[in-house]
Image: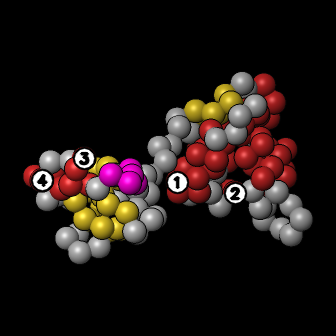
Amino acid sequence: MQTIYVHGGMAAEVLPVSEVPLADRYAADFLADCVQGGDEVAPGWVWNGTTFAAPPPVAASVPRQVTMVQAVLALHAAHGSAAGKTLLDDVEAAVAAASDPRIALAWKRASVLDRDGVFLAGLAPSLGLDAAKLDALFVAAAGIVV
């Protein structure tokens, strides 16, 4: 167990353990806002008056653009439409089958991939990629350091 200072319904500070009693280190009005919590509790945890709960996860923001290298690596890591295939395999097949030659040029020559670009708007539906799946791919791609 540890002593936690609660402010605004959240764990604001975990008080350091010391041989010196808390009453000798802190003012009484400060200690009045402290409670005991488990060793897992950290600043930011939510206090409901009885127990602590971990804060909800922060949603990753979706980047509007990733480099083509990041996009290709994220597609390579994602499962494709068939066993043993990656999503990169599916994209390359769709690009090769596209009737508009500009799609192949864009795929081969682009340095960045725009989340709201024409390239994705044309290919995503045929690959079964809805907005949520595209967002997840862009978040994954943005996390790749090249």
- Label 1: which secondary element: helix
Give the residue at the far bottom of this rendering.
50
Q: Residue at x 83, y 68 (%)?
A: 82
Give how far across and how far down residue 97 sits, in percent: 82, 48
Q: Which residue is mark 1?
A: 131
The amino acid type found where label 3 is placed reads: Arg
Say how the picture is coloured: secondary structure
User: Label 2: few (<14), some or many (≥20) within 10 Å?
Assistant: some
Residue 126 among those drawn in magenta: no
**Mark 4 and mark 1: Cα distance apart in space:** 54 Å
Residues at badges 4 and 1 in contact (C-beta under 8 Å)?
Answer: no
Q: Which residue is mark 3?
A: 25
Please give the range of residues in magenta. Answer: 16-20
Give how far across and how far down residue 135 sits, in percent: 55, 49
Which image quadrant for residue 113?
A: top right
- Label 2: which secondary element: helix
Between disc 4 and disc 1, the foreground one is 4
The amino acid type found where label 1 is placed reads: Ala
Q: Which residue is mark 4?
A: 28
Report if residue 50 is visible in the image. yes
